[in-house]
Image (tube, helix red, strand yellow):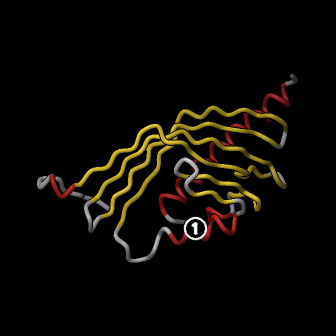
């Protein structure tokens, strides 16, 4: 492998990492218009161990927007780490990411935590890496009724 190819591979790996981190930030902050720009038009997605499956960007975005009704007091965030990215071709790659997810329904004081592994496929279109397929399988999920912990306080959020 020549130096130019090696440098391009490193640039591609960093671009894919940035893409995934943007995806997570957009999910956390409900930035649906920005999130849409990160997905291939024919993106395939599978969430909750295949409970929710989508085969195009429009359907997936409709679902995500519906999950975030304005005025509903909830807090969610995702954290991904430990990427295992494989470049298959100059315009194709795959990745596995460890993911931690936290969700809180504020009014009901119900908390959900999950650890899972995301499996992604990426495609480079017009010089930009996009998510072509994404989904996760849960390793662990737990819930907590926070109302049973009277001293627990949410200080920010």
Which residue in the rendered view is the most extreme toward the front? Answer: 51
Q: The N terminus lies in which quarter of the figure? A: top right
Image position of 114 with respect to 26: above or below: above
Asked whether, in this view, residue 104 is left or right of residue 54, the answer is left
Image position of 88 with respect to 56: above or below: above
Residue under label 1, please give it. 63
Residue under the image location 61 percent in, 71 percent down: 62
Which residue in the rendered view is the most extreme toward the left? Answer: 150
Residue under the image location 29 percent in, 58 percent down: 110
Q: The C terminus lies in which quarter of the figure? A: bottom left
Q: Secondary structure at mark 1?
A: helix
Asked whether, in this view, residue 4 is left or right of residue 47, the answer is right
Q: Residues within 10 Å of mark 1 (few under 14, many from 20)?
A: few
Asked whether, in this view, residue 73 is left or right of residue 42, the answer is left
Residue under the image location 26 percent in, 65 percent down: 108
Query: Measured from the top left, where is residue 59 in percent x and y?
Result: 66, 68
Query: Measured from the top left, where is residue 7 in percent x and y?
Result: 78, 31
Image position of 71 with respect to 100: above or below: below
- Foreground pick, 92 / 48: 48
Answer with the quarter of the image where residue 106 lies: bottom left
Count of marks, rendered view = 1
Residue under the image location 72 percent in, 62 percent down: 56
Which residue in the rendered view is the most extreme toward the right? Answer: 2
Image position of 122 with respect to 61: above or below: above
Which residue in the rendered view is the most extreme toward the bottom? Answer: 71
Query: Measured from the top left, where is residue 83 in percent x and y?
Result: 59, 34
Query: Measured from the top left, where is residue 12 in percent x and y?
Result: 74, 39
Asked whether, in this view, residue 73 is left or right of residue 41, the answer is left
Answer with the quarter of the image where residue 61 lies: bottom right
């Amino acid at each position: 492998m020549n130096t130019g190819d090696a440098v391009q591979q490193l640039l591609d790996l960093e671009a894919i990492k940035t893409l995934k981190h943007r995806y997570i930030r957009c999910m956390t902050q409900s930035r649906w218009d920005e999130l849409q720009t990160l997905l291939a038009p024919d993106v395939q997605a599978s969430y909750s161990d295949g409970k929710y499956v989508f085969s195009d960007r429009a359907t997936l975005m409709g679902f995500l927007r519906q999950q975030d009704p304005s005025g509903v007091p909830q807090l969610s965030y995702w954290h991904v780490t430990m990427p295992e990215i494989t470049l298959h071709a100059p315009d194709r790659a795959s990745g596995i990411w460890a993911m931690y997810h936290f969700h809180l329904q504020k009014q009901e004081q119900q908390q959900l935590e999950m650890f899972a592994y995301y499996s992604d496929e990426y495609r480079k279109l017009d010089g930009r890496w996009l998510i072509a397929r994404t989904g996760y399988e849960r390793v662990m999920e737990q819930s907590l009724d926070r109302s049973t912990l009277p001293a627990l306080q949410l200080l920010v959020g």
